[in-house]
Amino acid sequence: MEQLREQLTRIQPLDKDAIQQATQRQQQLTKPAGSLGRLEEIAIRLAGIQGTPIPKIQRRDVIVMAADHGVTREGVSAYPAEVTPQMVLNFLSGGAAINALARQAEAAVSIVDVGVATELHHPQLIERKIALGSANMVEGPALTSEQLFKAIQVGFDVLDEIAHQGSDLVAIGEMGIGNTTAASAISATLLQQPVEALTGYGTGINEQQRQHKIQVLQRAVQQNQPDPHDPLDVLAKVGGLEIAALTGVVIAAAAHRIPVLIDGFISSSAALIACALQPRITDYLFAGHASVEPGHRLILAQLGLTPLLSLDMRLGEGTGAVLAMHILEAALRTHREMATFADAGVSERTENT
């Protein structure tokens, strides 16, 4: 708990001077004011995050947290729990969508086992297993208090390491069969919405299975009574180890003044928790895309984030977040590389009198 408090107190407002200077530069570039739309806003906010009027991104990282969920025993997913370790090994062999997209974005990928319900060993796997998955939230809290804080600490540690290596931009992703159920329970509680409003089709369940999933969620919330005014209570009672670890990543990234691209529903539920603990964190977040999961759009609305892409994706893994890295890079390239009116000898707009 003490480490969490320390990280939260390190999070500072964006640099106003850098924002002002970046705004002035945008007004001097060879284009009509505002004509690059949100690219201008992105560049200016990145200036505030990095504390420099001309920010840059040299190293890009993707952090994928993996863990299993006890609630899968209730039949809430179209896939068995065995898929979690199988996909982790697929990540490590470079054969998943996140690997292909990360290679395109020239982003380093870190795969972290924080709670997969199988023993896994691989030279490139970051082994930080806390438990063999979470408990079944229908029967009681998904995580103990000790597990919760250990998972958050894993997020701190992983982010601190890549920050030490010089990371300028972090995308977050996850792997864990059953984690849309946890994300639905978390977001329904914190947003104080009925679970059916935030429950989609996850990995491809049908409508009958979705109704069953809603009933399971209602039982879990009734059993645990998570406090909507206490995000850590919510995370422990109806969350998961990988969501807790991603919460730690988001908090630590903001403390290091590193922008975070959040992915879909699950990683956004972690961001929702982080922002509930420290609202300033929102300034450090970019929404990579809009998932087809209904709860995702409600979370983004709550956080005041507009997605950069909308491609009807629902894979997770950080795929939508990594795709959006190209948008942020484009914003910075235009901000940095375009000539000013004075540099190019181009006449500026004249005001009619």
Image: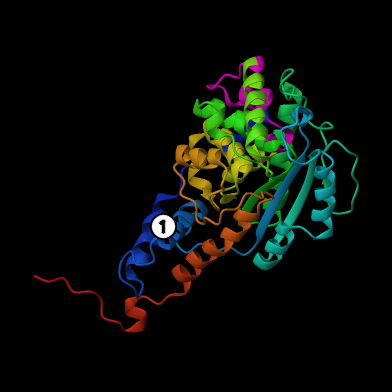
Residue placed farthest to the bottom in the image?
345
Residue 261 in magenta stretch: no
Identified by mark 1, the residue type is Glu
Q: In the image, 270: left or right of 95?
A: left
Quadrant position of residue 239: top right
- On the image, the x and y values in percent for residue 76 come to 71, 33
Q: In the image, 300: left or right of 208?
A: left
Q: Which residue is mark 1?
A: 41
- Is residue 169 visible in the rendered image? The answer is no
At a point 73% along the width and 42% down the height, the residue shown is 157
Residue 234 in magenta stretch: yes
Between 206 and 342, which is closer to the camera in this rendering?
A: 206
Between 210 and 307, which is closer to the camera in this rendering?
A: 210
- Is residue 312 visible in the rendered image? The answer is yes
User: Callout 1: 10 Å neighbours few (<14), some, many (20+)?
Assistant: some
- On the image, the x and y values in percent for residue 183 come to 63, 34
Vertical arrangement, residue 348 with respect to residue 70, above or below: below
Vertical arrangement, residue 322 with respect to residue 257, above or below: below
SS assignment for the magenta stretch, majority: helix
Vertical arrangement, residue 349 with respect to residue 199, above or below: below
Write down the region rendered in magenta: 223-244
- On the image, the x and y values in percent for residue 321 come to 60, 54
Residue placed farthest to the left in the image?
353
Tell me the quarter of the image containing the C terminus: bottom left
The mark total stands at 1
- On the image, the x and y values in percent for residue 51 come to 49, 54
Quadrant position of residue 240: top right
Secondary-structure class at tag 1:
helix
